[in-house]
Amino acid sequence: MKNRIITIVALAITIISCNQKNKQEETVKIESTTEVVGQSSFSIDKIVKNYLAIKNSLATDDSDAAADAGKALSETMTKTGMEKVSSDQMEAYMSIADDVKEHAEHIEDNGGKIEHQREHFVTLSKDMDDLIQLFGTNQKLYLDFCPMADNNKGAVWISETKEITNPYFGKDMATCGSVKKEF
């Protein structure tokens, strides 16, 4: 796992260095009257969208839809370019991203086993909170909490609505929980 992380970080640094070198060369070629547009900041919007699809599927007890959404999240994590992640955020992002991908894959691979999917959703939700803390969001989101989830240890999840729709108990306890924070 460490070798994988080190390899990915080294690759990301190489890509960033090459991109910066190419940008410097392009700047020299551009006439002085033309402005060079810089990279936009890193966005987790697609990651959040896929996460919310998992959450909504679990809240309606739809294990197969949760598996499909897990696949979409896993693919999004694979395709998400790291070139826009700042160097000071790279290490934290890599750690969180690997965990998100792993739990999304478990949710994907366990269609029909909703309780197992929900177990992985506990950690996935913590990771999403960490990503939002690290990068912010362009969308109004809520951090919800259910004290009975995760064998009465309590667990959080991210929601796009203020209304509680509990992904840990689905239709059996749809409104169990409370909003803890607004992003």
Image: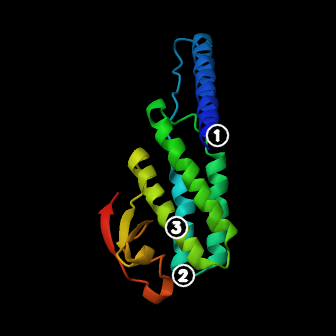
Can you tell which of label 1 and label 3 is closer to the viewer? Answer: 1
Where is residue 156 shown, x and y percent of the image?
Answer: 40, 67
Specify whether residue 170 is in view: yes
Q: Nearer the viewer, residue 92 or 142?
A: 92
Q: Label 1 belongs to which residue?
A: 4
Q: What is the quadrant of the C terminus in the image?
A: bottom left
Could you tell me if the residues under marks 3 and 2 are in contact, i.e. CB atoms within 8 Å? no
Q: Nearer the viewer, residue 150 or 183?
A: 150
Q: Which mark is residue 60?
A: 2
Up the image or down, 65 lies above or below 143; here it is below
Q: Amino acid at mark 3?
A: Phe
Can you tell which of label 3 and label 2 is closer to the viewer? Answer: 3
Up the image or down, 79 lies above or below 57; here it is above
Q: Nearer the viewer, residue 158 or 5?
A: 5
Q: From the viewer's perspective, is 28 left or right of 139? A: right
Q: Label 3 belongs to which residue?
A: 121
Where is residue 58 shown, x and y percent of the image?
Answer: 54, 76
Crowding near the residue tagged with mark 3, few <14, some 14–19, many ≥20 C-alpha atoms within 10 Å: many
Dot 1 or dot 2, earlier in sequence = 1
| C-alpha gap between disc 3 and disc 2 | 14 Å
Can you tell which of label 1 and label 2 is closer to the viewer? Answer: 1
Q: What is the quadrant of the N terminus in the image?
A: top right
Dot 1 falls on a residue whose secondary structure is helix
Q: From the viewer's perspective, is 153 left or right of 3? A: left
Q: Amino acid at mark 1?
A: Arg
